[in-house]
Image: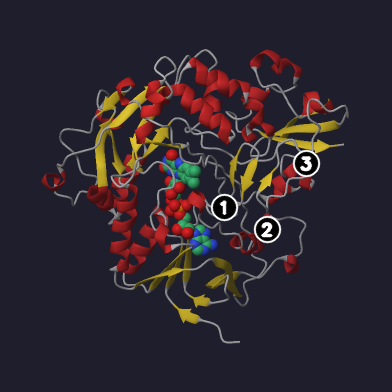
Amino acid sequence: MPVVEETYDIVVVGAGHAGCEAALAAARLGFETIMFTVSVDSIALMPCNPNVGGSSKGHLVRELDALGGEMGKNIDKTFIQSKMLNESKGPAVHSLRAQADKQEYTRSMRRVLENTDHLTIRQAEVAEILTEEIPGECGTFKKEHEGQQESSYPVKKRIVGVKTYSGAVYRCRAVVLATGVYLRARCIYGDVSNPTGPNGLQAANHLTDSLKANGIEMYRFKTGTPARADKRSIDFSKMEEQFGDKRVVPFSFSTDPKSIQKEQISCWLTYTNEKTHEIIRNNLERSPLFSGAIEGTGPRYCPSIEDKVVKFPDKERHQVFVEPEGLYTNEMYLGGMSSSLPEDVQYAGIRAHYFYVPEEPEKEVKKPVVIETPEPVVPAVEETPSSSGGSSETSKGLPGNDDNQKSHHSSKKKPSSSDEETKTYTVTFQTASGDVFCTQTVEDGKTASKPKLQPSVSGSWNYDFTKAVTENIIIKWSAQ
Ligand SMILES: Cc1cc2nc3c(=O)[nH]c(=O)nc-3n(C[C@H](O)[C@H](O)[C@H](O)COP(=O)(O)OP(=O)(O)OC[C@H]3O[C@@H](n4cnc5c(N)ncnc54)[C@H](O)[C@@H]3O)c2cc1C
């Protein structure tokens, strides 16, 4: 059967921040380059907060710019607020951060890519890396792996192209993988696990097997995003207004500062309150972060709100930055409220917070609460084979979970606290690299399926459950 077959110098898999820069760099050097994405409408999409820069990342953007990158130029064209952070401290820690108009940022980057010579953009899922053997290059790793026969080693291979899910073949001299948060991605909140990429985009489900077959070790990571709010439901009079800088400093060294001094949109600062914390504490056992359903390693400096409430029980409030997603929408990003809790808990927690004003019930009528569907956690990359080595029950964290389907896994297969049945579970606590440092046998639904997470009862566990998230500990359950 005839298949599409084309030849390029460079294949770039991905059209996020990384893929765009890689494709532009290659094409601008004159290499015939093709860039793949699961959706061309998601080019340079920022699935979380549409901002660029900030502490540590701001420096990266400017380094990219110094190397001829596009990100700095693109944010200079599309920002709606710009701020130099940490100005009260020394210049070494000054950090530029800009809030983008989410759609304008992607449109503008797409315009640049589409008008770059030597660059082809294609919407297709890359499913396989194609390789060929290099004659006479076998057994080169022998000295590093004692006890194995030379002949047991695969011959050395080189990449010769990629194959898409539809079977099309793209031959090339090099492949750049910039697959971001799409490889076998799942969106998880509460007991819902949905096999999808960010913002409902298709996950890339096939490439992982090919990478593994080529000896690439895979780890599973997770990240989170907060529910969004309609700005009409927000009482801004209860918040502190955050203005942009009076004199905007550009990200790109090639941008004329005079050209970007423009009217900016405000962001807002508010705080959680004790009521929000109480709702979170009362529902911790429904968080997949604590139940073991999520086992990826999380970002260290971007904890979820439940994580903060558990980790800092003495703190009466946590900061929430309310930031516009763009000029085209009422959607407001709730920075600091990232959560994996079920949607009813997220709604209750947010309403208890600053929208709902019990002493002024008419406020709710004037400003009806309209909250976007929460899309809290998107683990990005397929788990390492070593962490999935146990039974399917343990590797999914909860017995009987089938993550190929949209599933409501929670404690369905485990006895609920009201069940008469007594079941025994082995619970193991392991580090992200797979080292098991604590094992415990627990009996009965009461203890096993509904572990109490409040510090007051953590003593009944050999390991302090409440530290699991902050220490990136993976909890695995195995029914006996
Ligand atoms: C829920 C969530 C919260 C986040 N929060 C933050 C945050 O607060 N701060 C922050 O800096 N970052 C955050 N991120 C991460 C943010 O996505 C990254 O910073 C940034 O988008 C990564 O860019 P990237 O180019 O590496 O990958 P991505 O933006 O993920 O892009 C990956 C690209 O690869 C393509 N792709 C993947 N596999 C294939 C395939 N097999 N075939 C064809 N195309 C493929 C996709 O279509 C996409 O174009 C968050 C991400 C998510 C999902």
- Amino acid identity at mark 2: Lys
Q: Position of residue 368 (x, y in %)?
A: 41, 32
Which secondary structure, mark 1?
loop
Q: What is the three-letter code of the residue carrying label 3?
A: Pro
Look at the image and tell me whether residue 178 can be seen.
no
Q: Is residue 173 above or below residue 480?
A: below
Residue 111 appears in the picture as rendered = yes
Q: Which mark is residue 399?
A: 3
Find disc 1 in the rendering and name its residue.
196
Mark 1 or mark 3, which has the lower sequence index? 1
**Mark 1 and 3 residues: CB-CB less than 8 Å, in contact?**
no
Q: Residue at x 69, y 61 (%)?
A: 142
Disc 2 on helix, strand or loop?
helix
327 relative to 124, above or below = above
Percent position (x, y) of residue 366?
36, 28
Q: Quadrant of residue 334?
A: top left
Question: Along the line of sight, which residue is nearer the eye, 380 or 227?
Answer: 227
- CA–CA distance in space, label 1 to label 3: 21 Å
Label 1 crowd bin: few (<14), some (14–19), many (20+), radius 10 Å: many
> Residue 86 location, x and y as percent?
29, 27
Q: Identify the residue at image location x=47%, y=26%.
A: 351
